[in-house]
Image: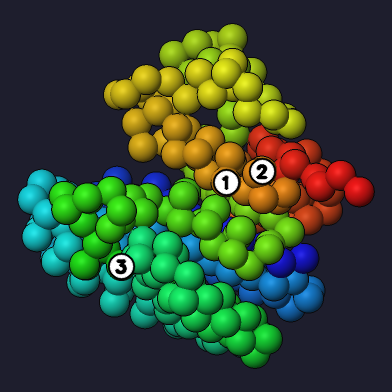
Amino acid sequence: MRIVIKVGTSTLAHAGGRLNIRRVELLCKVLSDLQNAGHEIVLVSSGAIGMGVGKLGLPGRPQNMSGKQAAAAVGQCALMYTYDKLFTEHGHTVAQLLLTAEDIQDPRRSGKVHDTLEQLITWKVIPVINENDAVSTDEIGIHTTIGENDTLSAIVARLLKADLLVLLSDIQGLYTADPHKDPNATLIPVVEELTEDILSLAGGAGSALGSGGMATKLRAAKIVMDAGLDMIIMNGENPEALYDLFEQKAVGTRFIGKKAHV
């Protein structure tokens, strides 16, 4: 299978921005094992700004755009150093691709991105993709930025015609209500259509699920489902749960892509 796996900052780092060493080491070990088993792994990784904050010893995430971009520039180096070191320990080579919205929207540039990724996959290299946070900015217009990596990973999965997109999150999947507030909330194991009822579960601005969380994941689901691809939201706290996924066990919430009628 060709799998695009997106990992968020909350999975990679502790609250202070420092790397969660045990979790990242285990993630790289599991992904290396899956690659050894014959799967094609593409990793979309957040965490540049958070790691930059930790490495610089800043008291928190910068509020101004130049501060965020500078922290991303520092953090991206640390992030790729970590991936290169850990994947090399398991016999795998990684490559870095930093993308902007123009790289995706312009057909010629998008084609080059596709060709580069296909070549890396042919060479058994694990691509590590992130938005180019050091130059991307949502202050100069929506068309210049992707904005977050849930959407980026969905675009990459569609571009590569992946078999599956996996979003590793800090939540088990999509629930019937906000599980942080409602003890009766239950996990929805399968979503076959993004109905208004399903979309409403993302919550409003500032909610635990909708604040940079479930809303962007449902946006990603629409992109891949419309392209006929499946997507899974699962908890990234224990990367070994990926083995359950590949053993066809029920994990998280699976969104079923629209299949073309023959």
Extreme residue in the right direction: 262
Q: Is residue 76 visible?
A: yes
In the figure, residue 75 lies in which quadrant? bottom left
The amino acid beneath tag 2 is: Met
Question: Number of numbered discs present?
Answer: 3
Residue 132 is tagged as 3
The amino acid beneath tag 1 is: Ile
Q: Residue at x 79, y 74 (%)?
A: 37
* 158 and 82: which is toward the camera: 158
The amino acid beneath tag 3 is: Asn
Contact between marks 1 and 2 (CB within 8 A): the answer is yes
* Disc 2, SS: helix
Q: Is residue 21 visible?
A: no
First in sequence, mark 3 or 1: give its number: 3
In the figure, residue 40 lies in which quadrant? bottom right
Extreme residue in the bottom direction: 123
* 197 and 5: which is toward the camera: 197
The crowding category of the residue bearing disc 3, from other C-alpha atoms within 10 Å (few below 14, some 14 to 19, many at least 20), is: many
